[in-house]
Image: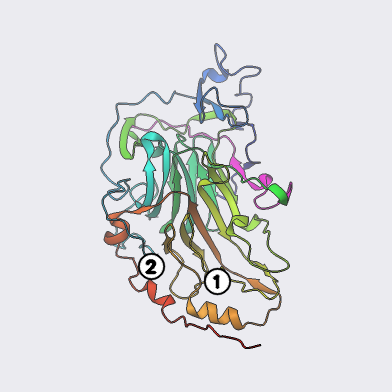
Amino acid sequence: MSEYKYLSGFGSHFSSEDERYPNSLPVGQNSPQVCPYKLYAEQLSGSAFTAPRTENVRTWLYRKLPSAVHLPFQPFKGADYFRQNWDEQPPNPNQLRWKPFDLPPKDGRRVDFVEGLHTVCGAGDPRSRHGLAIHIYSCNASMENSAFYNSDGDFLIVPQQGVLDVITEFGRMSVAPNEICVIPQGIRFAVNVDSSSRGYILEVYDGHFVLPDLGPIGANGLANPRDFETPVAWFDDRDVKDFQVISKFQGSLFVAKQNHTVFDVVAWHGNYVPFKYDLSKFMVINSVSFDHCDPSIFTVLTCPSLRAGTAIADFVIFPPRWSVQEHTFRPPYYHRNCMSEFMGLILGKYEAKEDGFAAGGATLHSMMTPHGPDVKCFEGASNAKLVAERVAEGTQAFMFESSLSLAVTKWGEETCQKLDASYYECWQALKNNFQITKN
């Protein structure tokens, strides 16, 4: 996997062809009467044809057979807890914390990426193309002779344990913990693993992930476009009997069979592509005088809503950095928020709650539900000597933040048996320290 090659840039118009078949891209037009090597031309559109040029995304694929060559779709049996029913549980406004989600059982049963998908929470409706869902995956086997695509929205995949070998119609990517990948709506892919693997997924229905505007920060900073990587063209030159194409459509899973792999794209060009990003390359912006900046300064990618400055979902990280603020309580402050905050931990210990929040687990702080540092963190930060110090060294926490109010599934609240009923206790020992000072 280390030998995979990538194209650099975010939002760029790329051109790529499998090096085994040079000159496989048509010259000067998209759909010639006869394509090079007698390939089929197929356009994959990620936006309306008439979308403004700045928002218009599509890619031309040159493949051995069109995607339409398959038998009818049938309901897919598997992934029983991968669903979007937001009304199966009563609303729960409490602070929620999950212990690390289980890896597949060590009983010899093979669980691939699709079979290991479990929905934790979400909001909205994929039929109206508005909303999001948050899932975890837990698998121990590769997807053999099968591929998956999401008709409902984009997947942002965050590995926590185990390296993912992701094969797409565009080429191959290796995605390790502390890296992420995005598979936009409709792009077909398969996930191979060589050990038990676990991670998080943010799915958005509304649009696509983009880089946040930098505003007064200026031209540089946060996640730089040059650090995003898109795979180069590669195709699998084989026929496969009963290859399975699994589709997520209107929140349900379907499967169709065909006698060839979907990974038969010899060349492609366009700006609608899968990509990966190494979180260690994030350029941190922070306060160098006083007070604690809002977490928006740690936004890697965003899916905007129609309201200016308000996201359907932001992907935010809390990477290692220097903390130098003067006369300031440095950890995140206590707050209530009009946004929903789902946090996960890839590695290490989160700075505001070093106890109880473990790698592979999660928290959900819903709209206007108060939260903040636990007792140990508050007392330590209130009495610490304020010198320059490294924060979150060896740690990578992240947040899926949304303007929508998220409902927890029955699997997330009951079936998984990972919800920590004692989470509220971490704030109970906070004391009333109010003092009346006489002049």
Instruction: State which tag comes first along the sequence, 1 or 2.
Output: 2
| Image quadrant assignment for residue 36 | top right
The secondary structure making up most of the magenta span is loop
**In this picture, which residue range is highlighted in magenta?**
218-241
Foreground: disc 1 or disc 2: 1
The residue shown at (43%, 49%) is 404
Q: Is residue 160 visible?
A: yes
For residue 3, side relative to residue 96 (left or right): right
Instruction: Tell me: residue 77, above or below residue 22.
Output: below
Q: Label 2's element? A: loop
Q: Nearer the viewer, residue 391 or 348?
A: 391
Circle 1 SS class: loop
Q: Which residue lies most toward the bottom here?
A: 438
| Residue 91 picture quarter | bottom left
**Any mark on residue 99, and which?**
2
**Lateral position of residue 330 relative to residue 73, left or right:** right
Residue 233's spot in the image, x, y percent? 57, 34
| Picture quarter with the C terminus | bottom right
Say which mark, if any, is on residue 351.
1
Q: Is residue 224 magenta?
A: yes
Percent coordinates x, y for residue 245 in the rendering: 36, 35
Residue 39 part of the magenta segment: no
Q: Nearer the viewer, residue 389 or 43?
A: 389
Which amino acid type is shown beneath numbered disc 2? Lys
Q: Residues within 10 Å of mark 2 (few under 14, many from 20)?
A: some
